[in-house]
Image (cartoon, rainbow, N blue to C red):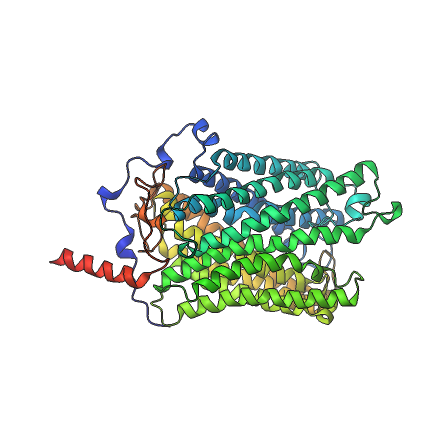
Amino acid sequence: MATAVFRPYEHQIADPHEVPKKHYLNAGFSAKSWLLTIDHKRIAILYLITVTLFFLIGGLFAVFVRLELMTPAADLMQSETYNKMFTMHGIMMVFFFLIPAIPAILGNFLVPLMIGAKDLAFPRLNLLSWYIYMIGGLFTFAAVLFGGVDTGWTFYTPYSSTYSNTNVILAAVGIFITGFSSILTGLNFIVTIHKMRAPGMTWFRMPLFIWAHYATSLIQVLGTPVVAITIVLVGLERLFHIGIFDPAVGGDPLLFQHLFWFYSHPAVYIMVLPAMGVMSELVTCFSRKKIFGYEFVAFSSLAIAVISFLVWGHHMFTTGQSIYAGMVFSFLSFLVAIPSAIKVFNWTATLYKGSVSYQAPMLYAIGFIGLFTIGGLTGMFLSTLAVDVHVHDTYFIVAHFHYIMVGGTIMAYLGGLHFWWPKITGRLYPEGWARFAALVVFVGFNLTFFPQFVLGYLGMPRRYHVYPEEFQVLNVLSTAGATILGVGYLIPLIYFIWSLKSGPRASANPWSATGLEWQTTSPPPTHNFDKTPVVTDDAYDYAKYAKEHAKAEEATLV
């Protein structure tokens, strides 16, 4: 990599004449102006607040799980309580944080801005999506208040449909309702991207963030109804004892797994594809280079979306499905690695000989590449039939999906939040603290989850709260890492809140980035642009941008 020469500090702080007097944040201060808003940027802020709240709740459950696992015996809680803790942690994190985090917050804020539109195609539907998300969250949170759920976040039958005495119906109804929020958001993005692009914004001039959200939206619209129907069937079986999944009344428990994973494996890409979109924006901006292989990165998003619907069976290698089906799913699982690898290769090639600047968003991007690569390579182990049988339902699985879903998604989410924070709030955050937080998160994450690969390899099963003493050292390391990770998450929360009032005013384009969202003020006006922008260049033409910038500086000096 080349030595960094890009110094964005010079462009970050706004000229006093540049600060907009009227923008979307001060367009109204009453509760009504926020709760009935149809401005996509304000709805993104509503999502930001609520998603963060659910993240903190889910994180609190994780704290209790890790505290219990510090000792081999059941010192803190009994098995049923422990089961509820990891179940609610999984439900809160997967359905109410990881899935909506990037699309609902960054996607809502940025999709219209990046394509030069004034809003999403259906603004009222967008607000309805947030209300549906909130109602679903309240139902699920009520399940916690009434005693929790102990089935695991996968709700495997017949345990969830027949034997469990906890609040399965309440939690399932919450997830069912929330699914509609995801479908409506995806539908809104698809129509907006098709119909509301600015003049000159052709498909191959679109930012890769938009391509990633387009592919994600296809999965949301096509896949989410399947899991919604599955959850309804669980409810019907519990309430009316209809034989759907319970073999005692003629059902088939494997049918549930087929239906559940048909959605839930693509759901991994609902979490990761938007993260990949964020990555493309960060890598190209902070290396000051056009993204390497734009078309390959764009089409790899669509390829991932398509192939993701064909690999659900690799979650069922140990269920007794035929060896031939196992071989097919194994092959297809290897296949999905190709478009993912294309992205990682192209990001790395973009960095090569780039003028790399190690600002906080870029540190998160580099962290993403590392964690996602480890998660992806261990996914290859799990795609192999014989290895999967050995490590199935062990902590190896826990470590793998945390590296992909949590490491990948959260690193990109935090990187994206730092990158667009000046645009969202009009304020800058303290760069030194941000870099420190990125380092703490990376160290804490690896210390938490890497020992779990070893635990799984040695045979410690997941979902157990009592274990042999030989596993204690690794579990203590994992808990220590979780503590560091928790601190790493709290630091940005503190300085972001601080920056809202005390942070320096941000310029319209603090990173000297390309893209339409940087051509409007920070924060943007209610209708995004004073004039509809016209796009004349390809995305990420940093070479042309640098020449124009140099000419402007030269003219100023003269």
Which residue does the image show at 48% across and 64% down from the upper left?
A: 296
Give percent across and percent down for residue 82.
71, 50
Identify the residue at the far left of this view: 558
Residue 157 placement (x, y as % from top left): 78, 49
Of 443 and 310, the residue lying toward us: 310
Quadrant where the C terminus is found in the figure:
bottom left
Q: Is residue 513 left or right of residue 248?
A: left
Q: Position of residue 4 (x, y in %)?
A: 32, 67
Front residue of this view, candidates 313 and 155: 313
Q: Which quadrant of the figure has residue 165?
A: top right
The answer to whether 324 is drawn above or below residue 67 in the figure is below
In the image, what residue occupies the spot 45% across and 27% down? 32
Q: In the picture, which quadrant includes the N terminus?
A: bottom left
Image point (28%, 36%), residue name: 21
Q: Is residue 242 left or right of residue 389?
A: right
Disc tally is 0
Q: Whole-percent x and y of residue 484?
A: 53, 57
User: Residue visible at 61% across and 49% down?
Assistant: 94
Tell me, yes or no, if residue 479 can be seen here.
Answer: no
- Lateral position of residue 175 relative to residue 49, left or right: right
Q: Quadrant of residue 363?
A: bottom left
Residue 544 visible in the snapshot? yes
